[in-house]
Image (spheres, grey):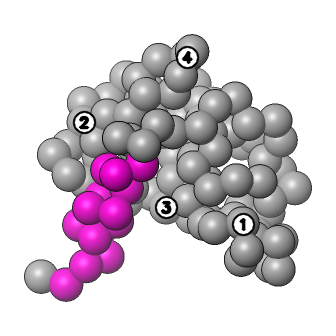
Amino acid sequence: MAQFDVYPNPGSRKAEIPFLVAVQNDHITSRTGACVVIPLRANIPPVEVMAPLVDVPGVGQFVLSTDEIFAIDASRLRHAVAALSTSDRAKLRPALDKVVGEY
């Protein structure tokens, strides 16, 4: 399981959240069995910095719903469909800082 891989959502809200992107590094995931993910939402407008638009190669564009970050058992994430590009990866840290940073 690689950081920045995109997985189909194994949960019940697949229509609104079709994918999850793994943001935790594999070193931690391999030790805990859990992975921190950010939902990729369909059909909602992006929000500057906090919820940017990202591209899932071969699938389309989705909104990185950073404020909904959570941990999931890594065994539920199967068969990555893509990995975020370098430019989309660069959007993650500012989005996370917006959500959990100091004001």
Q: Earlier in the sequence, mark 2 or mark 3?
A: 2
**Where in the figure is residue 90, as x and y percent of width and height?**
34, 51
Residue 72 among those drawn in magenta = no
Say few, some or many: other residues with alpha carbon within 10 Å of mark 1 (under 14 / 14 to 19 / 20 or more): some
Q: Disc 4 on helix, strand or loop?
A: loop
Within-10-Å neighbours for mark 2: few <14, some 14–19, many 20+:
some
Q: Which residue is mark 2?
A: 46
* Residue extending furthest toward the left: 103
Q: Residues within 10 Å of mark 3 (few under 14, many from 20)?
A: some
Q: Which mark is drawn over residue 59?
A: 4
Residues under numbered marks 4 and 1 in contact, where contact means CB atoms less than 8 Å apart: no
Distance Cα–Cα, label 2 vs label 3: 16 Å
> Considering only order in the chain, which callout, 3 or 1, is on the residue closer to the N terminus?
1
Would residue 82 appear left or right of 17 to someone viewing this image? right
In whole angstroms, how far apart are the C-alphas of marks 1 and 3? 17 Å
- Residues under labels 4 and 1: Cα distance? 24 Å
Residue tagged 3: 69
- Residue at left 63%, top 67%? 25
Image position of 11 (left or right of 40): right
Amino acid carrying label 3: it is Ile
Residue 99 within the magenta-colored segment of the rendering: yes
Name the spot of residue 14 as percent of width and height, x first: 63, 30
Q: Disc 1 marks which amino acid? A: Asp
Drawn side of residue 52 relative to residue 49, left or right = right
Which of the marked residues, 4 or 2, is nearer the chain's N terminus?
2
Q: What residue is pinned by disc 1? A: 26
